Image: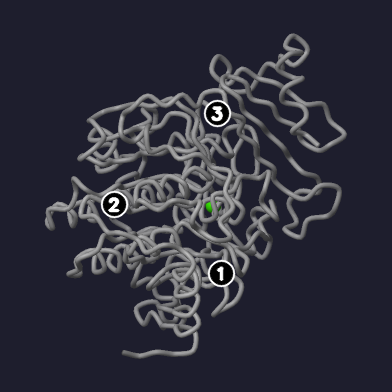
Amino acid sequence: MKTNKKKLVNIIRTALLGAVISAPVYSAEEPNIIFILTDDLGFNQIGAYGDTKIKTPNLDKLADNGLLFTHAYAGNTVSSPSRVSLFTGRDSRIMKDNTNQARLDDGDVTLAHILKHASYETAMFGKYSIGYSYGITDPLSMGFDTWYGMNSILEGHRQYPQMLWRDGEKIIIKENEGNKKGAYAQELFTNEAIKFINKDRSNPFFVMLNYSSPHAELAAPERFVKMYDGVFDEEPYTGMSTGTPSDKYASYYPEPVEKPNATLAGMVTALDEYVGQVVQTLEDNDMVDNTVIIFTSDNGPHQEGGADPEYMRAAFPYKGFKRDLYDGGIHVPMVISWPDKIRKSRVEDTPIIFADFLPTFADLSGVSLNTVPRVRTNGVSIINLLTDEPQIMDDRLLYWEYGAKAKVTSDGVIRQARQAARKGEWKAVRYASENNIELYNIISDPGETTDVSLENSDVMNELSPLFK
Ligand SMILES: [Ca+2]
């Protein structure tokens, strides 16, 4: 076996973590877990949510066979803090950084560490983007036995990458050399995930499959885009091809896109086909019943590279998009399948948030978080929601914050923190500290159109202390 320095560091770290915690006991009943994270997929961009022209038969079937959350929330409204929240089980209240510069820290305990401790075989495929240093915060150091994909945020901007990473080593994607479009990133990630699932093993596995789509750049194999020829009005995106940027993010996505809406729809249908292939692999191995599959998105739909989420009603019925803390930026699709425990076609309206997955995975794998050194989470396990037992969580407070308070953030997008909170039917939002806190009834007014803060002083008294 090839052992390099990074792997050795990882082995030592895992051993140290294991030495302090009591030995895990593997039970054959512990489910495999596949977490499928898409990038900037809006609430209303898959068929299971009922109001889109985008075809997603495999995802719709997954929802039919499982549980569809109508009030699931991402960790934040942009990739990095949302993913750090997911990996560490922390919401914005206890995150160290709520900007898009957020990264994992040496010493953070991730959901992969938890499952590793429970003797899961762990693997990550696709966009990582929240590490900063090999041997310290790369996936191998953060609880994954193996990984394949994109390391940095900027690498995630290419749908036909010329280079990817495998276990810390750069690999050249020959099919895409010289700007050729021979190998689609999302298909490569899927193929690697399928290979991993097909391996013989005696322990359960955890796969984190982080697609970098339908994030810009907008591009998908032609057969998917063709399906939407003539379906949408189109305004061609010129990128940097005319010498003048066609939108403020054009330098990130320089290539022109003739039919942005058809392309984005094709990207989603491609993802749907890849998810179908993963599910088929589980079926072929007779593993689908005891595998928890979670499908969701890291934040709301983007308005970049030619995408037009307003025309596509990508966040409908919610207001705002990526970078907003109105619900369109954070209210995400979420489907969970686990045929052994979840009865078919359930719909769950309890609000849940990304920070809940670390404690949930601990429960699924039989790890007591009390025994895990350094773990710091304020999420709540939703295992009882998954196993269809009553779990009243309607009254807890959820909170998000995007951007740094009273200082210039370096992502060039906002200058003041945006904040939001939710309790039950109430949603409070403030854009910049000098503004008033707005209050909406998110159930009767999902579009956050009518500020009812003046009429509900009791609710405001309860939520406003969060807006420090
Ligand atoms: Ca994202």
* Of 355 and 249, the residue lying toward us: 355
Residue found at x 37% / y 64%: 23
In the rendered image, residue 462, in percent from the top left (x then y), is placed at 72, 22
Q: Secondary structure at mark 2?
A: helix
Q: Is residue 51 left or right of residue 279?
A: right
Q: Earlier in the sequence, mark 1 or mark 3?
A: 1
Q: Which residue is mark 3?
A: 318
Q: Amino acid at mark 1?
A: Ser
Q: Nearer the viewer, residue 456 or 252?
A: 456
Mark 3 crowd level (few <14, some 14–19, many ≥20, 10 Å Cα) = many
Q: Which residue is label 1 attached to?
A: 152
**Which quadrant holds the C terminus?**
top right
Relative to 281, say whether 310 is above or below. above
Q: How far is the residue under mark 2 from the one under mark 3?
A: 26 Å
Q: Can residue 74 be spotted in the picture?
A: yes
Q: Image point 33% across, 68% down: which residue?
A: 188
* Residue type (three-letter) at the residue carrying disc 2: Val
Q: Amino acid at mark 3?
A: Tyr
337 or 403: nearer the eye?
337
Residue 275's tag is 2
